[in-house]
Image (tube, helix red, strand yellow):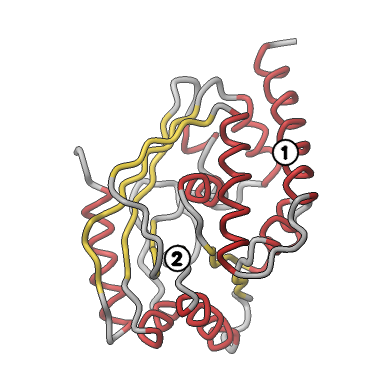
Amino acid sequence: MSRKWWRKWFRFIVVIVTTLQALSQSRGLQTRHQRAQWLHEWCSTLLRRLHIHIEFTGTPPATGLVISNHLGYIDILVFSAIAPFIFVSKSEVKDWPLFGQMAIRSGTVFVVRSRKSDVSRVKDEIVEALHDDTAVMLFPEGTSSDGSSVLPFLPSLLEAAVAAKATIHTAHVRYSSSDGDVVQDVHWWGDMEFMPNLFRLLALDDVHADILFSEDTYRISDRKQAAIDLHQRMLQLHGRDK
């Protein structure tokens, strides 16, 4: 059997063991900051054990709303490994084995995407988190992409930043590997199934995440115009070094 076969199964066991260790130490988490800090520590541990390397430029925000492009579930692991964040995620994540429990216990704000009336509840939860002086991470594209560009931003959840009068920070993530095609093996988008994608990721010899935290900050009063303006800013970050 190939080295890739052994590598992916060994690392899969590492994922299971690390996740179980994290869940066993999740009791007693009460505040949002405690939950975000717990996720931060365990994502750092997991990525170190998986030899997924992170480099970032700029200062990770400690408070406010942070928006980023979105390339798949690995984004949450990478950003969490850098700093404590509360995430906004689709409700389906709650049903994922083990990972769903990690998301629940870390204080993730879940969005029921098929229910438009859920936006108001989610906005209130985000506002509450922002008032707790916790950095909230939002992917305003609403879904992940192949990374060739940045999808248009959905303005609905930006309403929380208006209501909380919160500062908005921007970040951009991208991945590289000497061992595969990141679009197919690292990014998780379109109709890709979760487990096959995870195994392709774990089989790679190396994965590198490159994060840029922009020094620019924003305060918004109109979510629709903000969605357009922030999308343009993200496109500029996306084109860095080109």
Q: Are marks 1 and 2 in contact (CB under 8 Å)?
A: no
Residue 221 is situated, as x and y percent measured from the top left of the image, at 27, 86
**Rendered image: mark on residue 135:** 2
Which quadrant does the C terminus fall into? top left
How many marks on residues? 2
Amino acid found under the numbered disc labelled 1:
Thr
Residue at image coords 45%, 65% = 135
Residue 225: x and y in percent read 26, 80
Q: Residues within 10 Å of mark 1 (few under 14, many from 20)?
A: some
Structural distance between the alpha carbons of marks 1 and 2? 25 Å
- Which disc, if any, is residue 99? none
Relative to 150, 239 lies left or right: left
Task: Please state if 204 lies on the left or on the right of 222 as rendered.
Answer: right
Helix, strand or loop for disc 1: helix
Q: Quadrant of residue 15?
A: top right
Up the image or down, 185 lies above or below 215; here it is: above
N-terminal-most mark, 1 or 2: 1
Foreground: 139 or 33?
33
Which residue does the numbered mark 1 point to in the structure image?
A: 18
28 or 239, nearer to the observer:
28
- Return the x and y of residue 159 as percentages of the image width and height: 40, 83
Judge whether 89 appears above or below 209 on screen.
Answer: below
Q: Position of residue 119 (x, y in %)?
A: 54, 84
Amino acid type indicated by mark 2: Ala
Left or right position of 130 against 107: left
Up the image or down, 59 lies above or below 111; here it is above
Task: Give me the residue at 44% from left, 47% from top.
Answer: 146
The local crowd at label 2, few if under 14, some if 14 to 19, many if 20 or more residues have their Cα within 10 Å, is many
Kindly identify the residue that appears in the image at 59 percent across and 71 percent down. Answer: 109
Q: Quadrant of residue 9?
A: top right
Residue 22 lies left or right of residue 62; in this view the side is right
Quadrant holding the N terminus: top right
